[in-house]
Image (tube, grey):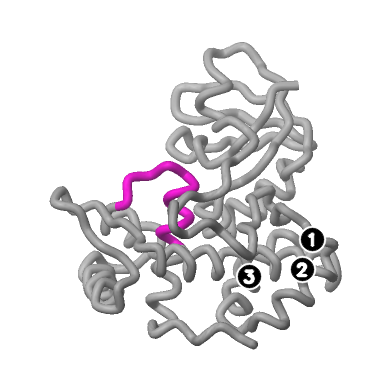
Amino acid sequence: MDSPEPPVSPAGINCLRTIYNLMEDSVPLRRIRVAQRLGVAGSTISETVARLQEHGLLTTTPDNLIELTPAGHRIAASVVRRHRLAERMLTDILGVPVSRVHSEAIRWEQVINDDTERAISNLVDGSVKSPWGNPIPSADDGAENRVVPVHTGTPLTELVAGRAPTDVIVESISEEAQNDPDAVRALVNAGIVPGSRITAVARRSHYLLRGTHAYELPTDSAHLVHVVRM
């Protein structure tokens, strides 16, 4: 039997998913951060947050940080799970280019029901990561503790320093980076995708990454790429 539909709008679902993604990236949960990721006005997010509070899906702290309630975490984790399972299906089964699966999966995530979710999980052999290397939350996500799966890699900013080239393997690329279609295409064209071996050098305003081709990743986005040292 399917779970009851969440009493929130598509905008509310997008907000919950974005909050979950921010938690994965260890970004402080402030309204302005959510608005920036979604590309909407701060006033719009304030209205959405207020509605989600009314539904008991999140709370705000005295210093205006957002916190998911257990119910809000369950919905957010479920949406992220369905999003990343859809990405796997689109890539592994339907052959959609990895550069397009994120935007396509956003359309799928809100219409996949419980039975379809299980079927997709079986189709992709119970994969535990998205094509972009991000952990797929389990069906039982541990909402009471409100934790998110841990990235296995280290942010590029913490592993690569100075001007000496460092050889690394790409572990994952954050949802935020995937929201920029031009950046996604450039990364794919340069061969900078999960599992690839690249060389990284820290520069003044960017990281020079070299896979099959070179790509300049802005310093303020470098924490969105997780890597392991070779």
Q: Amino acid at mark 1?
A: Gly
Q: Residue at x 32, y 51 (%)?
A: 29
Residue position for label 1: 126
Q: Is residue 167 left or right of residue 220?
A: right
Name above or below for residue 22 compared with residue 214.
below
CB atoms of marks 3 and 2 within 8 Å = no
What range of the chain is rendered magenta?
A: 18-29
Mark 1 vs mark 3: in front? 1
User: Mark 3 sits on what residue?
Assistant: 82
Give the mark nearest the N terminus, 3 or 2. 3
**Is residue 90 at all visible to an observer of this figure?**
no
Please state which of residues 178 and 140 is positioned toward the viewer in this rendering. Answer: 140
Helix, strand or loop at label 2? It is helix
1 and 2 marks in contact (CB < 8 Å): yes
Q: Is residue 34 left or right of residue 119?
A: left
* Residue visible at 40% across and 67% down in the picture: 72
| Amino acid, disc 2 | Ser
User: Tag on residue 163?
Assistant: none
- Give the residue displayed 43% in from the left and 49% down from the top: 23
Give the Cα distance between marks 1 and 3.
12 Å
User: Residue drawn at (43%, 37%), measured in percent from left and top?
Assistant: 220
Q: Amino acid at mark 3?
A: Arg
Please state the horizontal and vertical placement of residue 201, each as a whole percent of the image: 60, 21
Q: Nearer the viewer, residue 41 or 78?
A: 78
Q: Residues within 10 Å of mark 2 (few under 14, many from 20)?
A: some
Judged left or right of residue 160, residue 19 is: left
Percent across and percent down for residue 103 are: 60, 69
Residue topped by disc 2? 121
Q: Is residue 194 magenta?
A: no
Quadrant position of residue 166: top right
